[in-house]
Image (cartoon, grey):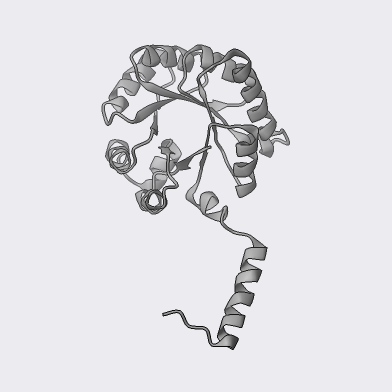
Amino acid sequence: MKFFVDTADTDAIAELNALGMVDGVTTNPSLILKSGRDILEVTKEICDMVSGPVSAEVIALDAESMIAEGRKLAEIAENIAVKVPLTWDGLKACKVLTDEGKMVNVTLCFSANQALLAAKAGATFISPFIGRLDDLNMDGLELIADIREIYDNYGFETNILAASIRSANHMSECAKIGADVATAPPGVIKAMANHVLTDKGLDQFVKDAKQAGIKIV
């Protein structure tokens, strides 16, 4: 499973990228706002930093304007994936931009039917939102499994990009289900390294090393 980092924080991206933990980046208007930077400027910096897809989201709601914005965003770099919402107009924009050879990430997916439509429209990525479904006492991971089954049944090439990841457990569960990609905040990716027994074992090793007077350098 590929890891995308869900942030516009270039320092956080650089840290994870240096460890080989970044296969791509996803951004959205909320993350751009949090960065406090111009969307074109920060997106270009991210694209220069990573070799994988960088999702940049349109803000228009009608298909014609989405297409215009998508073309503008795609000019930033070759690895831009234009992010459009899963609406009827978003699907129209997806079809046009895909036919033009651009990568398209269809976002805000909350049902298998929506994912099926996105695949038919030629989406490069479909972004089901796990955490937001969990917030409504619905099973976000079950949606990932449903989409995986449908795509495998018919050979759709659209990548399942699990989004709205809230925990390290979400990451491992998505990997078991077969999501192609999971996009998560930097803190969630780093939290995957944590385990209470690792901490406990390390604490004991350190105590024993001090007691034995062990020195390596």
Quick check: 214 left or right of 138?
Answer: left
Q: Position of residue 163 (x, y in %)?
A: 55, 36
Q: Position of residue 97 (x, y in %)?
A: 37, 16
State whether residue 81 appears in this view.
yes
Quick check: 183 left or right of 81?
Answer: right
Examine the image and state in which quarter residue 83 appears.
Answer: top left
Residue at image x 39%, y 54%? 15
Examine the image and state in which quarter residue 196 appears.
Answer: bottom right
Q: Nearer the viewer, residue 134 or 21?
A: 21
| Total labels drawn | 0
Given the current orientation, which residue lies at the most extreme right position? 137
> Which quadrant holds the C terminus?
bottom left
Examine the image and state in which quarter residue 175 appears.
Answer: top right
Q: Is residue 52 above or below residue 17?
A: above
Quick check: 70 left or right of 115?
Answer: left
Q: Is residue 89 above or below residue 51?
A: above
Q: Position of residue 119 (x, y in %)?
A: 52, 16
Q: Is residue 120 above or below residue 214?
A: above
Q: Is residue 166 above or below residue 163?
A: below
Q: Nearer the viewer, residue 95 or 39?
A: 95
Residue at image x 60%, y 75%? 205
Residue at image x 39%, y 48%? 17
State whether residue 131 appears in this view.
no
Q: Position of residue 143 (x, y in %)?
A: 66, 28
